[in-house]
Image (spheres, rainbow, N blue to C red):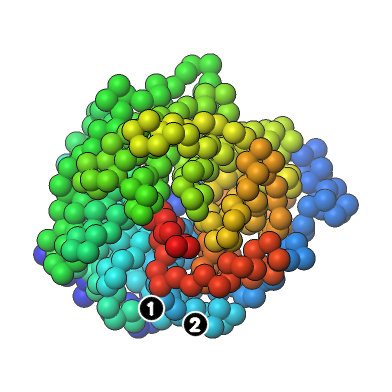
């Protein structure tokens, strides 16, 4: 009943701007004012041209900045992006926005839906749109308010919308999941969609999120009857509890679930970034994912955040979100192996597959100590015979990098803005940067950016056209 009432409310807001109430869990760094010497050093670096000026846009010669669509009705943090046909769907802590990108240099807002609940990680499949809610709410409606997770009546989980009319998305169902839904991954079938729900940080005082929380929730959604979506199982991935954490490595986060999973349905594989562990999964039976191999990097990975397969499925790039996305970790002090990407090769086949570490990649451009910067969401640029990726680094901007030679990964293009502040550590920058049908789209906190890369090393990707793209449901770009 609550979801049905909220659907009407949400659709009414799509016709025009909505007054959004910011979610209280919008990411914010701990208050940290730069010391006078540090602030002076940042300003001196700007003066020498080593750092862009606040707000200044800089980029490599092969990247063109086509446009930025500023946030309007939804003023919360911009999050993930999904694509379908000529449309992009951008999640926001306050809801989501549908853009018409038929003319990439001039996107047009089709609708804006006010439905608060961080972080509103977003995916689409056919006529359905999915949102993750990892913010404890008073109920499952779009008119809900924040409510402590210590209260049994609080709600977190998956919301489902009908987007057959993109100008008026309709809220059709909601499924509560243990510990909510920080992110989710679709494993689509012809008649039903399995949704892998990643969540973590259980506590004994949370009635709906108590330890042990050693796996992922699985939601099943019938395509023709999404109102019957339901939680069907909880897959235990870490029966031994996973990485326990270490006192002498306080930055390393113990495993209490997964942060994100990328499925490669065509290969019946998935890669899970699960806090203190990276896992390779067999998803030949989507309702029963099974761990094939598990790896840890106690020395350099603090928080296994996300994963991307190479086109042939023989490599996985895992990201480390050191500092939780709000720390300044792209500096000389942190170094080039922490808060970075880890490139792994998959050796062997089937049940004998294993993940072998090869090398790290981190952007080669140091950022100011007032800029949150760490490896974040990205996608492949589908170039034949090469492994090329575009990736967000928060205020470190966007990096296009080549890992065809895994031992010698290198940046081949970039786009970034100057620091939000030279006085204090401030949250900002790009959350996700994805390549779709010839362009790069980025959910920056300054707005929805559209970029183009013109480079002989990536130009072949312009011929690859997709009807739909959820980056965490990785497609076989070329057959």
Image location of residue 276, percent across then percent down = 44, 30
Q: Which label belongs to residue 50?
A: none
Instruction: Name the outermost residue toward the right.
Output: 48
Residue 323 visible? The answer is no
Q: Find disc 1 in the rendering and name its residue.
A: 111
Q: Residue at x 27, y 78 (%)?
A: 164
259 in relation to 49, above or below: above
Left/right of residue 238 with respect to residue 349 in the rendered view: left
- Tell me where residue 211 sits by quadrant: top left
38 in relation to 105, above or below: above
Q: In whole angstroms, how far apart are the C-alphas of marks 2 and 1?
A: 15 Å
Q: Nearer the viewer, residue 176 or 434?
A: 434
Q: Find disc 2 in the rendering and name its residue.
A: 102
Q: Residue at x 34, y 82 (%)?
A: 167
Q: Nearer the viewer, residue 411 or 119?
A: 411
Q: Which structural element holds mark 2?
A: loop
Image location of residue 324, percent across then percent down = 51, 40
Residue 254 visible? The answer is yes
| Sequence-earlier tag: 2 or 1 | 2
427 in relation to 453, above or below: above
Q: Quadrant of the N terminus?
A: bottom left
- Tell me where residue 369 sits by quadrant: top right
Image location of residue 457, percent across then percent down = 68, 61
Left/right of residue 235 with respect to residue 22 in the rendered view: left
Image location of residue 366, percent across then percent down = 73, 44
Q: Quadrant of the C terminus?
A: bottom left
């Amino acid at each position: 009943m609550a979801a049905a009432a909220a659907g009407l409310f949400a659709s009414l807001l799509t016709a025009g701007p909505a007054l959004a109430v910011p979610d209280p869990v919008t990411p914010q760094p701990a208050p940290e004012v730069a010391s006078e010497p540090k602030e002076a050093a940042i300003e001196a670096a700007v003066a020498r041209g080593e750092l862009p000026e606040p707000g200044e846009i800089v980029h490599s010669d092969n990247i063109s900045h086509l446009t930025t669509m500023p946030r309007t009705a939804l003023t919360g943090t911009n999050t993930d992006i999904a694509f379908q046909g000529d449309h992009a769907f951008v999640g926001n802590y306050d809801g989501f926005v549908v853009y018409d990108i038929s003319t990439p240099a001039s996107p047009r807002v089709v609708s804006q839906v006010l439905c608060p609940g961080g972080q509103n990680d977003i995916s689409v499949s056919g006529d359905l749109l999915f949102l993750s809610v990892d913010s404890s709410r008073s109920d499952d409606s779009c008119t809900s308010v924040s409510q402590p997770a210590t209260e049994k009546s609080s709600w977190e989980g998956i919301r489902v919308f009908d987007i057959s009319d993109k100008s008026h998305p309709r809220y059709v169902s909601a499924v509560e999941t243990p510990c909510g839904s920080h992110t989710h991954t679709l494993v689509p079938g012809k008649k039903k969609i399995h949704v892998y729900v990643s969540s973590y940080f259980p506590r004994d005082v949370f009635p709906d999120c108590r330890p042990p929380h050693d796996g992922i929730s699985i939601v099943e959604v019938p395509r023709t009857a999404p109102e019957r979506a339901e939680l069907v199982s909880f897959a235990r991935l870490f029966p031994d509890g996973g990485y326990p954490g270490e006192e002498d490595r306080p930055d390393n986060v113990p495993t209490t679930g997964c942060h994100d999973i990328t499925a490669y349905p065509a290969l019946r594989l998935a890669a899970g970034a699960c806090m203190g562990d990276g896992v390779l999964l067999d998803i030949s039976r989507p309702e029963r994912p099974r761990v094939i191999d598990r790896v840890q990097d106690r020395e350099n990975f603090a928080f296994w955040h996300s994963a991307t397969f190479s086109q042939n499925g023989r490599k996985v790039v895992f990201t480390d979100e050191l500092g939780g996305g709000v720390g300044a970790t792209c500096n000389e002090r942190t170094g080039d192996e922490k808060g970075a990407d880890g490139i792994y090769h998959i050796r062997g086949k089937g049940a004998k597959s294993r993940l072998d570490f090869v090398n790290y990649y981190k952007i080669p451009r140091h950022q100011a100590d007032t800029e949150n910067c760490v490896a974040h969401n990205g996608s492949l640029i589908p170039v034949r015979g090469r492994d090329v990726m575009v990736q967000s680094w928060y205020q470190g901007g966007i990096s296009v990098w080549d890992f065809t030679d895994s031992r010698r990964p290198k940046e081949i293009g970039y786009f970034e803005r100057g620091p939000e502040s030279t006085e204090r550590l401030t949250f900002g920058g790009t959350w996700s940067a994805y390549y779709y049908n010839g362009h790069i789209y980025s959910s920056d906190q300054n707005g929805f950016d559209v970029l183009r890369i013109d480079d002989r090393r990536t130009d072949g990707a312009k011929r690859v056209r997709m009807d739909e793209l959820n980056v965490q449901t990785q497609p076989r770009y070329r057959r």
